[in-house]
Amino acid sequence: MFEEYAPVRILKETLRKARDIAGVECFGFHDCRHYFINHAVMRGIDYMTITRRVGHKDGGVLISRVYGHLNDEHAKRQAKKLRLA
């Protein structure tokens, strides 16, 4: 029988414990990846760098298609803050 790789098992167990403490029903590794990519895009990190970090092999196509709108929306929100000052 296949035994799970120890770091994966530890991560899953840690996420399960954190979910229980926070009272969140569903939260997993994919949610962590999504959070990382969202924030990297909003901080202006180029798609190729993000792609290499998350292990995509498509040259940033998926990130630009799925997350690309965040860059524009984030830039607009930041520009509005400048007008308020």
Image (cartoon, rainbow, N blue to C red):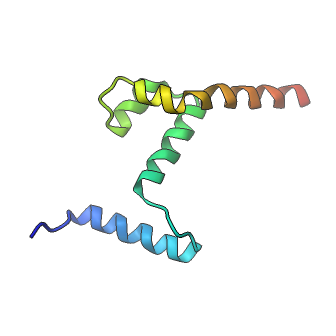
Residue depicted at 37% across the width and 36% down the height: 53
x and y, in percent, of residue 44 in the image: 57, 27
Q: Is residue 26 left or right of residue 76?
A: left
In the image, 16: left or right of 79?
A: left
**x and y percent of residue 4 in the render?**
20, 65
Compared with 8, 25 (above or below) is: below
Residue at the (40%, 56%) spot, across then down:
29
- Residue located 23% across and 66% down the image: 6
The answer to whether any part of residue 35 appears in the image is yes
Relative to residue 23, is residue 62 depicted above or below? Answer: above
Residue 57: x and y in percent read 29, 29
Image quadrant holding the N terminus, namely bottom left
Q: Is residue 22 left or right of residue 80?
A: left
Q: Residue furthest left?
A: 1
Res. 85 in view: no
Q: Residue at x 32, y 68 (%)?
A: 10
Is 9 rendered above or below residue 78? below
- 64 and 77: which one is in front? 64
Q: For the C terminus, which image quadrant?
A: top right
